[in-house]
Amino acid sequence: MNFLGIYYPEPEWYQARIGLVTSSKVHDAITKRQKNKAGEKKLPHELPELAARANLKRQMIAEMLTGMTTEHYVSAAMDWGVAQEPHARVRYEYQFGANVEPLGLVMHPTNARAAATADGWVKENGLLEIKCPETYTHLEYMESGVIPSEYLDQIDWQMACAGPEIEWCDFVSYDPRIEAEELQLFVVRRERHQQRIEEMEALVNDFLDELIQKFEAIKRNAKKQTVSEKLRESIKQARGQYPTDEELGITEDDIREFA
């Protein structure tokens, strides 16, 4: 397991994730296209890209160009949940007799632009994904008895990045505010689905290919624009100072000639 020893919410954790498809981003990265509307029969490649996927590309490119991470809103409830995670790990260890270590950012074993952060490593072959939600949400999880669908891609990507030795991940919901202790911890296990992981890895590669192409195209266009501006300035200096290209009679053929 290639873990970096960088933990949320350290500043280094945010910095290290720039340009990487992480477990919090993977769902948007691999969900490519909108679905056909009623009566439509468009082929998959004819359907428009989902807005969330397009926005993720822009966000990641912005971070790659600036070296600064995108800020996300953090509510008081989210802060409370983060503060409760260590207590949830201890409670899990006590209830299941397990040895759990905090697990920071883990790099994918073969893809240098992919990573994940699980909430715990259950030696030797398990992970934890811990949620400390509002009480009504915790009770909803318990009532359903299954892992909420919005977390499945996140959990599968954590197992993919942690490596083939990881065989399962326990989804943990914890709420110490409930007086009845037997209701405070809810745990559901997800076994490793290798076929699904391989499908996700292929889709992430597609996304990263598109991301890098778009990133390089932006840099090329910016460079061309800079070169064009320099050429126009050179022509102005050669012919005299005039305020506009139109007054100078500068054409695109002129620019190509000087280039």
Image (cartoon, grey):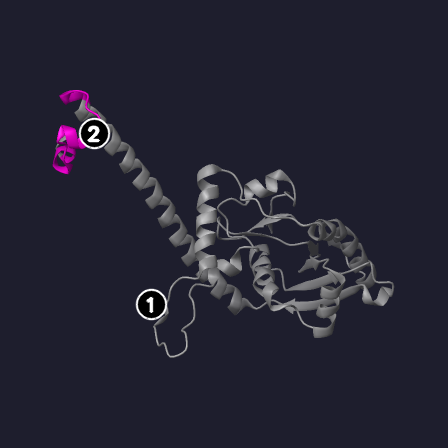
Q: Is residue 217 above or below residue 232?
A: below
Q: Quadrant of residue 170?
A: bottom right
Q: Quadrant of the C terminus?
A: top left
In magenta segment, residue 58: no
Q: Position of residue 231 (x, y in %)?
A: 21, 29
Q: Quadrant of residue 147?
A: bottom right
**Residues at marks 2 and 1, CA–CA distance in whole angstroms:** 43 Å
Crowding at mark 2 (Cα within 10 Å: few <14, some 14-19, many 20+): few
Say which mark, if any, is on residue 133: none
Picture coordinates of residue 139 (x, y %)?
75, 68
Would you say the residues marked 2 and 1 are in contact, meaning their CB atoms lie under 8 Å apart?
no
Magenta part of the protein: which range? 237-256
According to the picture, the residue beneath numbered tag 1 turns out to be: 46
Left or right: 224 with respect to 40? left
Disc 2 marks a residue whose amino acid type is Thr
Label 1 secondary element: helix
Residue toward you, 191 or 181 = 181
Mark identifier at residue 244: 2
Residue at image location 44% in from the left, 49% down from the top = 58
